[in-house]
Image (cartoon, rainbow, N blue to C red):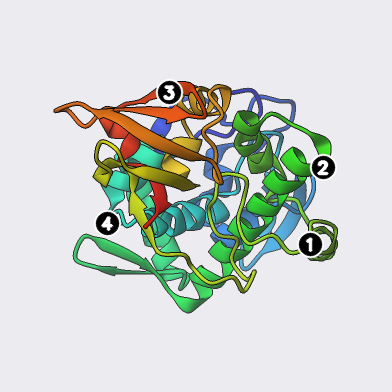
Amino acid sequence: MLGQPLPASDRSAGDHGTVGVGAPTCEEKRGQPLACLRHDGPVREREAPGKGPVRLLFMLEGYHPPLEEYLEAVHELEEDHIPVIQARLAERLGHSAPTVSETVRRLRDEGYVEIAGRAISLTDKGRHQAESVVRKHRLAERLLTDVIGMEWHRSHAEATRWEHVMSDEVEERLVVLLNNPSTCPHGNPIPGSGADEPNLAKLADAEKGDRVLLRRVTEQVEFDADSLTHLGVHGFKPGVEATVMTKAPDGALLLDIDGRTIEITGALAQLLYVAA
C-alpha cells in the first residue's frame, strides 16, 4: 500500500520502507519507543537520547500506528473471548510471526502488555490506551452511519482511519451529538458509555422455531466486508428479530425476517450474538 512502512522483517534488503521522497528507512525507526510512532503530524525530526536528531515517520493515510493497532487487536480478541496469543494477533493484523513477536516484546518492555507463557494480556496502562482507541472507532462508526448516512458495511473500514487522529475534544462532542450511544452500529459496546452488558448467546445455539433478536456482530465479522454486506442487504442488523426456519447438520441456518429469508452459514452464526 502506498505510504505504508514495511516492518524490517517483512521486506527485502534494499527496500526503504515507505514509498516517498525523503521517507525514513525502517532502520531509522527501529529501536525507538513505540509511542514515538503515534500520529503527531508529518515526518519530522526528534532528538533521541544519545543519538541526536532522528527522523520519524508518523501516520499516513491508511496506516495504523503500531502501538494502538496491536493494543486494539488484543482488546478485540479478549472481547470476542478468543485466547490472545501471537498466532491470533498475526491472523488478525496480517503481520508475519517475527514482526508480531518483536512488537509484542516491545509492548511488554514499555508496560502495555504482560506475557504469561503464550498468553498475552493488557496491563492497566495498555487497557486504558486500547479502550480509548476502540471508543473513538465506535463513536466514529456511529457518526458515519447515523449522521452522515454511510452504508453499514463500509463504516468499519472508514472509522479505522479516524480512530487514531480524533482528538479528545472531538470525542466529547460526538458523545453529546450522538446522545451517548452504548454500542457501535454493529452492536459492539462502546467503552466508557456506562451501559450494562446484556446477556447474550450465540446465534449458532438457536434451534428450529426459535425467535431471535440480533444484538451483536463481532469485530471478526466487521473485517469481512462480504459477510457485512450479506447481513446488511438482507436487513439482519442489531435490533432486528428473526425466526429460525431450518437448521442444517453443519449449523447453517435459514432465517425468516418478516417474510424475507436469509441464509447464515454455521461459521458466521458462531460470530453473531442474540438476546439470550
* Residue 3 coordinates in the image, percent (x, y): 66, 29
* Label 1 or label 2, whichever comes before in sequence order: 2
Q: Residue at x 45, y 51 (%)?
A: 73
- Residue type at mark 1 is Asn
CB within 8 Å, label 1 to label 3:
no
- Residue type at mark 3 is Ile
* Residue that badge 2 annotates: 147
* Label 2 or label 3, whichever comes before in sequence order: 2
Q: Residue at x 35, y 67 (%)?
A: 121
* Residue that badge 3 annotates: 262
Q: Neighbour class for label 4 at 10 Å: few (<14), some, many (≥20)?
A: some
- Residue type at mark 4 is Pro
Q: Nearer the viewer, residue 32 or 146?
A: 146
* Residue that badge 1 annotates: 179
Q: Considering only vertical position in the picture, is 236 above or below 184?
A: above
Q: Neighbour class for label 2 at 10 Å: few (<14), some, many (≥20)?
A: few
* Residue 243 coordinates in the image, percent (x, y): 39, 36
